[in-house]
Amino acid sequence: MNSRATVGFIITVLIIAGVSLAVLRHLQTGIPFMPGERTSVWLVEARVDFVALGGPVTASLSVPENTPGFEIAGEQAASAGYGFSIVEGEGGRRAEWNRRTANGNQSLYFSANFFPGSPPEEVIGEIPVAQPVFWGDAEVTAASAVIEAAKERSSDSQSFARELAGLLSATQPSQNAALLLARSENANELLGKLLNAADIPTREVMGLPLEDARRRQTLKSLLELYDGEQWILVDPDSGPMQAPEDLLLWHRSGQSVLDVTGGRSSRLSFSMIRQSVPAVQFAVD
């Protein structure tokens, strides 16, 4: 009995050790548990078009670094006659093209693979602060009333944002909310102003809705708020939310998405295609 118990104990230990190693390998490298497991990968291509003026050209495009729900791999650039590099600074990662002399129509390309995953958490450097808001007298009065109404029914920044979104998206908004909506470009812009007026920092972010085999797509303006610990995506209709699986947050810094020096009429568009590939292909060595 003792020998059988010993053998059984050894077998149990070996099984536990094997399972633990498999789990650890999966967590550290992303190697799937099951052979033949596949995952969906998005190949996204950004295209920059502009007219060069005949002199030196520098084009700088914001590219993703920490985008919720995705990890990035296989970055490539195509730009005949241009020098290319990835520049990292306070404004995040940027793809930069340079050329001594260029004239006429120009097209630059940047592509990358995005696969489901959890990127490293965004490092918060200097604590964000709310931006000043400039309104007329009537708007100040209306904004104060809307803010107070939302505060009465909330307990923190996230619930406050949710209440604000509800007041602005109501079928029959209050007189104060209606006045503010009538004098704003859109609900997203107004929500950002109201949050900043309530001393809650916000930033504009640009998201790319993902749809298979689409071309000439543009970025969608969205909003994030800072709750004291992290940036949280905000829907102007419903408030704070998790980033949808079909939304790629392309740009999340305070700088512009695209800057072109030495050119005019710049345009940014995107093409995308979804592929099914072996999950092990994107495992970390």
Image (tube, rainbow, N blue to C red):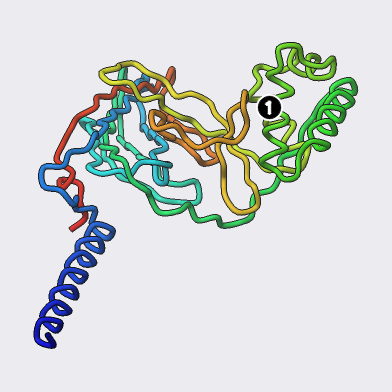
Residue located 64% across and 47% down the image: 227
- What crowding class fits label 1: few (fewer than 14 Cα within 10 Å), some (14-19), or many (20 or more)? many
Residue located beneath label 1 in the image: 165
User: Would residue 131 be found to the left or right of residue 122 on screen?
Assistant: right
**Mark 1: secondary structure:** helix
User: Would residue 148 be found to the left or right of residue 107 on screen?
Assistant: right
Residue located 46% across and 36% down the image: 251
Looking at the image, how many numbered discs can be counted on the residues?
A: 1
Say which of 183 and 78 sits in front: 183
Residue located 46% across and 29% down the image: 207
Instruction: Report x, y in % for residue 141.
Output: 89, 25
**Image quadrant in which the N terminus is located:** bottom left
Label 1 sits on what residue type? Ala
Residue 115: image quadrant is top left
Say which of 100 and 175 sits in front: 175
Residue located 53% across and 26% down the image: 221
Instruction: Report x, y in % for residue 257.
Output: 47, 32
